[in-house]
Amino acid sequence: MEPTRDCPLFGGAFSAILPMGAIDVSDLRPVPDNQEVFCHPVTDQSLIVELLELQAHVRGEAAARYHFEDVGGVQGARAVHVESVQPLSLENLALRGCCQEAWVLSGKQQIAKENQQP
């Protein structure tokens, strides 16, 4: 297994465990303020952490799916596949006093990178 490191996100508001060689894309090109983007130097895979606006018309697991599919649609994804959606235990969250529920969605989207065709 590849060595990992703890990586602060959004100015240290929270963090993620990433492969040691993960490259912070903001060192290479502009990244929107609501995103943290990392890429793997060998596999050409990317990890995007995106803060999204609350959509009051969807809740729970449906909200996680809504945002994932919406981002895929905006980015022109050729394929969007949800692998799993799991609730997070609120007692393990730093923001536990601020939210009533939290979900993590794992999935894949097939999207063309910057100057590539889909």
Image (cartoon, rainbow, N blue to C red):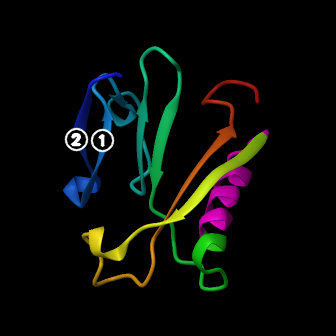
Where residue 110 appears, x then y in whole percent?
Answer: 70, 36
Residue found 22% across the figure and 54% down from its top: 11
Which residue in the structure is indicated by mark 1?
17
Residue found 58% across the figure and 77% down from its top: 60
Which residue in the structure is indicated by mark 2?
6
Q: Secondary structure at mark 2?
A: strand
Packing grade of label 1 (10 A; few <14, some 14-19, many >=20) is few
Would residue 57 appear left or right of 94 to someone viewing this image?
A: right
Q: In the rendered view of the protein, which quadrant contains the C terminus?
A: top right
Residue found 64% across the figure and 55% down from its top: 71
**Residue 45 is at least partly visible in this image:** yes
Q: Secondary structure at mark 1?
A: strand
The reply to whether discs 2 and 1 touch (Cβ–Cβ < 8 Å) is: yes
User: Which quadrant of the structure image shows residue 25?
Assistant: top left
- Compared with residue 20, is residue 94 higher up or lower down, i.e. above or below? below
**Amino acid type at mark 2:** Asp
Residue found 27% across the figure and 26% down from its top: 20
Q: Outermost residue toward the top?
A: 42
- Compared with residue 16, is residue 87 higher up or lower down, i.e. above or below? below
**Amino acid type at mark 1:** Ile
Q: Is residue 74 magenta?
A: yes
Q: Nearer the viewer, residue 106 or 31?
A: 106
Where residue 92 appears, x then y in whole percent?
Answer: 28, 68
Precedes in sequence: disc 2 or disc 1: 2
> What stretch of residues is rendered in magenta?
64-78
**Residue 93 is at least partly visible in this image:** no
Would residue 68 appear left or right of 1 to someone viewing this image?
A: right
